[in-house]
């Protein structure tokens, strides 16, 4: 039943986002294989048959989590901005609209910029979020900070 409810290519998420490159089935099968789920399930079943009063259980549960502001009044929040300065010496100064609060957002943005520009992370420096550099910032909330700001940096 869990697999019946998987998203498929072209489905809309509960945040009204169309899915492209949907690979949930492959991810699911990889998880099952890497954790050796079938063998472990057989062991649990055998244990439960052999023990009247003591039982074990095992499960793997997929979850759907929104990464978006989805209410009609919130759709304008699905945006982000970035300002990227490239200097003559090859150094880069990166400013984006996300707020770092321990989730590693600055590191993630450095990684995105490094990959997009094809330069080492050590050449990239970040500024604090500032509305005089990146105005009209959206809240860093609802698991959206990395996705929205990462696409802006890219």
Image: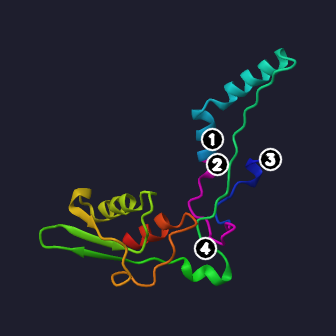
Q: Residue lying farthest top?
A: 50
Report, in whole angstroms, how far the alpha carbon at label 3 lies from the one at label 4: 29 Å
**Residue 94: where, in percent of width, then height?**
30, 70
Question: N-terminal of the two: label 2 or label 4?
Answer: 2
Question: N-terminal of the two: label 3 or label 1?
Answer: 3
Residue 25, label in figure: 2
Residue 1, label in figure: 3
As drawn, is 105 to the left or to the right of 35? left
Report, in whole angstroms, how far the alpha carbon at label 2 lies from the one at label 3: 13 Å
At 45% across and 84% down in the image, what residue appears?
A: 136
Question: N-terminal of the two: label 3 or label 4?
Answer: 3
Q: Residues within 10 Å of mark 3 (few under 14, many from 20)?
A: few
Circle 4 residue: 69
Magenta stretch?
12-26
Q: Is residue 139 above or below residue 19?
A: below
Circle 1 residue: 29
**Residue 5: where, in percent of width, then height?**
75, 54
Q: Residues within 10 Å of mark 1 (few under 14, many from 20)?
A: few
Q: Secondary structure at mark 2?
A: helix
Q: Residues within 10 Å of mark 4 (few under 14, many from 20)?
A: many
As drawn, is 93 to the left or to the right of 46? left
As drawn, is 113 to the left or to the right of 120? right
Report, in whole angstroms, how far the alpha carbon at label 2 lies from the one at label 1: 6 Å
Compare residues 154 and 125 and report the one nearer the observer.
125
Compare residues 1 and 141 and report the one nearer the observer.
141
């Amino acid at each position: 039943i869990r697999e019946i409810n998987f998203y498929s290519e072209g489905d809309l998420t509960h945040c009204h986002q169309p899915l492209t490159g949907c690979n949930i089935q492959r991810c699911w099968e990889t998880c099952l294989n890497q954790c050796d789920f079938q063998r472990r399930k057989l062991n649990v079943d055998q244990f439960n048959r052999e023990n009247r009063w003591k039982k074990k259980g095992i499960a793997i549960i997929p979850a759907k989590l929104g990464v978006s502001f989805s209410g009609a009044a919130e759709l304008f929040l699905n945006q982000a901005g970035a300002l990227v300065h490239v200097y003559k010496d090859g150094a880069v100064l990166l400013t984006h609209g996300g707020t770092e609060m321990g989730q590693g957002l600055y590191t993630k943005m450095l990684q995105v910029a490094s990959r997009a520009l094809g330069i080492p992370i050590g050449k990239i420096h970040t500024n604090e979020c500032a509305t005089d550099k990146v105005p009209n910032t959206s809240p860093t909330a609802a698991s959206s900070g990395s996705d929205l700001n990462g696409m802006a940096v890219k």
